[in-house]
Image (spheres, helix red, strand yellow):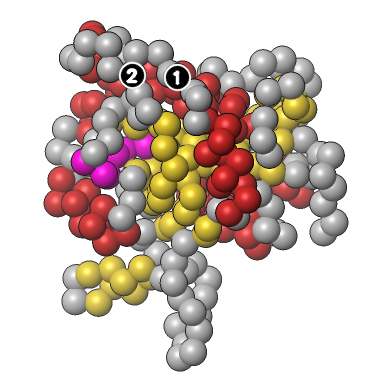
Amino acid sequence: MTRTTVGPLGILSAIPEEFAHLDEAAGETQCIGALRFTHGVIASRPAVFVECGIGKVNAAIAATLLLTRFECRALLFCGVAGGLDPSYGVGDVVIATRNLQHDYGMLIAGTIHTSQPGVPVRPGLDRTPGYELPQHLAAALAAAVSDMRLPPLPAAVTGDIGRSPRVALGTILSGDTFLNCETTRVRLHTTFDAAAVEMEGGAVAQVCHRLGDVPFINVRCLSDLAGASSHLDFRTFLPVAAQLAAAVTRRAAAVV
């Protein structure tokens, strides 16, 4: 498939709260199955927006359609995630320099040995997991957000008075399980040196890789810290986190 550099951007979110703050000029909508693709604008660039639903399969379906039906030249995912790195706090935004599916691999003696999706288990094949952001794109994103100052978090939401969220680049994990477990949070952070965990980005990265190494930017604001109370934190912080993720996504869209 030949892809141009003048096609629209493809913008994905999993749930309505993530999707609500993105489209700057909604236009024609096209339905394919249960998915609604809306033409619009982000960062003065034409784009196609879709609320894909939660999970890797839903995200992969929507990503494939954006690339094949709408010939998008790059994809961006805007959403929330659980924090893994204890140095991060709720409201911080992470842009993925590596997207990795932590739940794909072999289960041996109760432990998942993660590998690259689709790579056969045969001697001599590199099964190292993860899809890396090209260095030139990572550098452009780092420069684009270096002067970004996000608004202070409401004290009523976080309990912190006036703490301003930061924007960072790092590894983001994906898996088809909402993480509500401190033990697993520690294991995933330790094993992969990852900043955050969510349920879609790794699948979108895989689709982009398989369909021609299409640029993919995964932007996630931490709505919870993926531990024992994440099921409570998620709903509390979701509205604020979604707005912050959208602000960073607009900045990222301007460089791709």
Query: Which quadrant of the figure contains the C terminus?
Result: top right
Q: Residue placed at 57% from the left, 58% from the top?
A: 206
Q: Sequence-wise, which precedes: disc 1 or disc 2? A: 1
Q: Position of residue 157 (x, y in %)?
A: 25, 14
Report the disc number at residue 32.
none
Three-letter residue code for mark 2? Ser
- To which quarter of the image does residue 253 belong? top right
Above or below, 3 against 118 in this view is above
180 w.r.t. 97: above or below? above
Which label belongs to residue 149?
Answer: 1
For label 2, the crowd category at 10 Å Cα-Cα, with few meaning under 14, some 14 to 19 and many 20 or more, is: some
Q: Which residues are magenta?
A: 80-86
Magenta segment: does it hold 82?
yes
Front position in the image: 16 or 153? 153
Disc 2 secondary structure class: loop
Horizontal and vertical percent position of residue 101 = 42, 58
Left or right? Give the position of 186 relative to 19. left
Check disc 2 and report the residue beneath it: 164
